[in-house]
Amino acid sequence: MKKRAMMIGYGRGTLLILLSLVLVVFVPRAARAAAGTGSCQALNIPVALGAELPAQYTIYGELCNPASGASHTVQLLIPGATYGHIYWDFSYQSETYSYVHALNAAGYSTFNMDRIGTGLSSHPLLSLMEVTMKTNAYVIHEIVGDLRGGLVGNQSFARVILVGHSLGSAMVWIEAGTCHYVDGVIVTGLAHHMNNTTFAGILGTFYPAALDPRFADAGYGVGYLTTEPGTRGRDFYYLPGADPSVIATDEASKETATDGEATTFAPVLVDGISAQIIVPVLLVVGQQDSIVCGLLATNCSSAATVRQAELPYYAPQAQLQVAVIPNVGHDLNLHKAASLWFAAAASWSYQYVAP
């Protein structure tokens, strides 16, 4: 197979990557058939939504290991708004679009979770309990502790890498910048300078989940949002680089967000929390991401321009590195060139937080 190359920006130059490539409830999952991957367990993990609150809710996640068995490092995967765990382990052509598949094959265990209020995780009654960015960061911190403590799948991990997408990346900033309990951070689909026009347009497509045919019978109550039917391709994809079948699958499996997440997201961009992260950070954006990139947003023409814009928002200890993936929009996992970013994540992980 012909090899392809991409450039990733580093603190001291660039690296050329050649691509060849607690109570736990157990639910068995079939072993993966793809070469290089092992098996997964579906788990429900008790969590509280804040300090001094009872652990009365559950987080659904899937713990997947390489074929050789559990690694010493686990990557904790946090999806963005209106996405769940399927974003990281896509059901359509997983050999192309599954981050879980790619990183398991690279030797890393993964824990791929639905955020609180999404997918198979608990959906709190939002009239009684607000779910905000900090709520999610608190829950993520609990999961990190459980992964380290052997409370997830009876496996104890020495090291944890947080991997976020979009809204999930902002939650990663909060957890990593506040708690200093992880060993590395991968941020995707997020920068401190956003395209406000595009972002406002996307927010305009959010409407009550109860009005959507997918969630009409779910009984989630007020405060849960999703995207209007038929808008995801325009909002989250660079259409020339995407398969229409992927977009259709995305529409059919879309998830929710809460109004509390929506109203507490913007302050995270300006509160300086990312500068408190003191472990290595990889930032990855699609070159055609209309939410992050643009004339009045981030210059995504190269890894160097993105790194120049983002470097002031990170501490020197973060050793910020950047990858810009061509022909890719906001949903990096769900474009035809997803393998480029998967390889970048694996290469960076090898360098900073070995399996």
Image (spheres, rainbow, N blue to C red):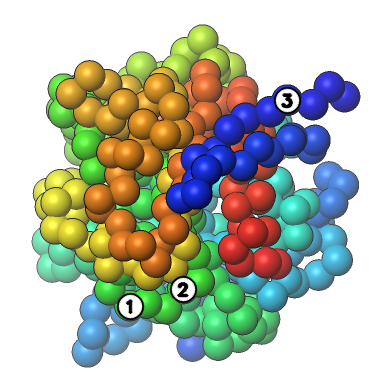
Mark 1: amino acid = Cys
Quadrant in which the C terminus appears: bottom right
Which residue is denoted by mark 3 in the rendering? 4
- Residue found at the far front of this picture: 12
Mark 1 and mark 3 lie on one chain; the one further toward the N terminus is 3
Quadrant of the image occupied by residue 288: top left
Is disc 2 placed on a helix, strand or loop? loop
| Mark 1 to mark 3 CA distance (whole Å) | 38 Å
Q: Is residue 24 visible?
A: no
Relative side of 263 to 97, left or right: left
Of residue 258 and residue 308, the one placed in the foreground of this image is 308
- The Cα atoms of the two marked residues, 2 and 3, are separated by 32 Å
Tag nearer the camera, 2 or 3: 3
Q: Nearer the viewer, mark 1 or mark 3?
A: 3
Residue matched to label 2 = 182
Residue for point 45% across, 17% down: 238
Residue 287 image point, x, y percent: 44, 24
Q: Residue at x 58, y 75 (%)?
A: 159
Q: Is residue 344 above or below residue 164?
A: above
Q: Residue at x 22, y 34 (%)?
A: 194
> Disc 2 vs disc 1: Cβ atoms closer than 8 Å?
yes
- Residue 197, given in percent of the width and then of the height, sits at 16, 22
Q: Furthest residue to the top?
A: 240
| Crowdedness near tag 2: few (<14), some (14–19) or many (≥20) residues, C-alpha within 10 Å | many
Do we see residue 1 in this rendering? yes
Name the residue beneath numbered marker 1: 179
Q: Secondary structure at mark 3?
A: strand
